[in-house]
Image: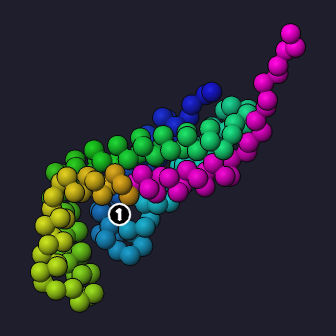
Amino acid sequence: MKNTHIMYGFLTALAMIILGVLLYVTGNAFSKGGQYLNYVPYIAGILINAIAFSKANGHNVTFGNVFSSCFKMSAIITLVMLVWSFIFMALFPQMMEKGLETARASMEAKNMTAEQIDQAMKFGTNKIFIAFILIFSNMFQGLIFSLIGAAIAKKNPQQPKVQAL
């Protein structure tokens, strides 16, 4: 089978990075719409990969083949975004501070106690916790998007011809 997940994984991650930087530079990274805007290149990339994978293999693919390609792509995206997130936080430490301020304001609006907010803030500064959340959330989203991609890709699996003895 011809693979497409590597190229599309890196291209999609690049698109997500560019969009994230643009949102940050324009001050929209923490806006309600800005938080969800990065899903657009993620799901679009997965869907494009699903279609490209099916086409590259002459549509001789199964749901599982397409799902596998898309899920591997989401793993590549997750790894690139994990590395980028730590680079971005090192380059722009104020981004982390702004994120924590936004999270604190959101928790205060939900009438959480000061103790609950302080405990959540401790987790928000723990790099291992951040990495775990990033990996889990990206892979979970990748799972959902991969299922959608596998469902929409054209599939026409051919049975191998068995020669009579």
Which residue appears at 24% of the width and 75% of the height?
A: 102
Q: Residue furthest top?
A: 165
Which residue appears at 63% of the width and 27% of the height?
A: 1
Q: Is residue 96 left or right of residue 1?
A: left
Q: Is residue 161 left or right of residue 89?
A: right
Which residue appears at 52% of the width and 37% of the height?
A: 5
Q: Is residue 11 left or right of residue 158?
A: left
Does residue 24 lie above or below 56 as drawn?
Answer: below
Q: Which residue is mark 1?
A: 23
Residue 27 % position (x, y): 29, 69
Residue 11 visible? The answer is no
Q: Is residue 29 left or right of residue 119?
A: right
Q: Amino acid at mark 1?
A: Leu
Residue 23 % position (x, y): 35, 63
Label 1, residues with CA under 10 Å away: few <14, some 14-19, many ≥20? some
The secondary structure type at the circle numbered 1 is helix
Q: Is residue 150 magenta?
A: yes
Residue 110 % position (x, y): 27, 87
Does residue 22 lie above or below 112 as drawn?
Answer: above
Q: Nearer the viewer, residue 52 or 138?
A: 138
Q: Nearer the viewer, residue 24 or 90?
A: 90
Residue numbers of the magenta segment = 138-165
Residue 77 % position (x, y): 41, 45
